[in-house]
Image (tube, rainbow, N blue to C red):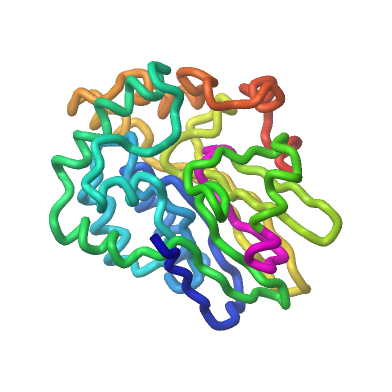
Amino acid sequence: MDKKNIQLDSITGNTILFGGVYSNLQALEALIQVAKEEGIAPENCFCTGDIVGYCAQPEKTVQKFIDWGANSIIGNVELQLRNGDEDCGCDFKAGSRCDTFSKSWYPYAQHLLSEESINWMQSLPDHICFTYAEKKMTLVHGSYENISEFIFKSTPWKQKEPSFTITDSDVIIAGHSGLPFVDKFQDKLWLNPGVIGMPANDGHPHVWYAILDDSNGFSFEFKTLKYDHSKANKLMIKNNLPKEYAKTLLTGFWDNMEILPQQEQLWKGQYLNKIMY
């Protein structure tokens, strides 16, 4: 299927980048409040996909996102849902813990989502491009060529390079991996703002996003987001979703590190601000 790419006009002013809402309504509401307090309009807010995921309120989360009016590309979860597929398409290893857990949360989300929400997913583009502070930015979920490719800070640059070459971009804004990081090579920048639906395995219940700033050229800053993680946890337990993921909302530690390269496994529980840059 041909990719649907959207080319926006130049974006100016502070801009919020985030990913992986994962059906976590409480986290999304907290981020919307941050945007309002910072005076950042919805059109300056960009999601790297997977609005639906592990947590308990997929329909309310999608509807809240639609009402907010922020931008998003499609994540692998939305792609699978709109196609009526039977699995999340996360590229988990068959038989792994993540694969087993997905057999619980994915059909749960599939059952609760309305026809309106699924139809809205049909409108989501694969990629969004825009210029910011004279840099060409492109949003991808995993990578440009593979929506479910796990790209981390330690991933060799040769795996990142094709996304820049194909899109002729200066900055790739990516999601999927669940961890915030930036990787720079020469004049190119791979920026993953993190996800707001689950903690980043750093031992804290807060989650991560990033803000672009063009007030003095081009700059960005990773930010932590506090939200009512206790409520999100209780809703997961109430709806018989994986208790291991529900626990992660409280502890900040992942249940397992099956998808992580060795380097990222060593960062478990560490203060990420020293690692991300």
Residue visible at 71% across and 41% down in the picture? 276
**Residue 209 appears in the figure:** no
**Residue 47 appears in the figure:** yes
Location of residue 77 in the rendering, given as x and y in whole percent from the top left corner = 35, 45
- What is the quadrant of residue 133 in the picture? bottom right
Whether residue 275 is situated above or below residue 40 in the rendered picture = above
Instruction: Tell whether position 171 is magenta.
Output: yes
Residues 72 and 160: in front is: 160
Query: Is 110 displayed left or right of 90 in the figure?
Result: left
Residue visible at 44% across and 64% down in the picture? 3
Which quadrant: the C terminus?
top right
Location of residue 112 in the rendering, given as x and y in whole percent from the top left corner = 15, 43
Q: How many marks?
A: 0
Query: Is 107 displayed left or right of 93 in the figure?
Result: left
Whether residue 239 is situated above or below residue 75 in the rendered picture = above
Residue visible at 65% across and 52% down in the picture? 191
Whether residue 77 is situated above or below residue 230 in the rendered picture = below
Q: Which residues are magenta?
A: 164-179
- What is the quadrant of residue 234 in the picture? top left
Location of residue 45 in the rendering, given as x and y in whole percent from the top left corner = 48, 65
Location of residue 211 in the rendering, given as x and y in whole percent from the top left corner = 60, 60
Q: Residue furthest bottom?
A: 9
Instruction: Tell whether position 232 is magenta.
Output: no
Residues 210 and 146: in front is: 146
- What is the quadrant of residue 53 in the picture? top left
Residue visible at 44% across and 45% down in the picture? 20
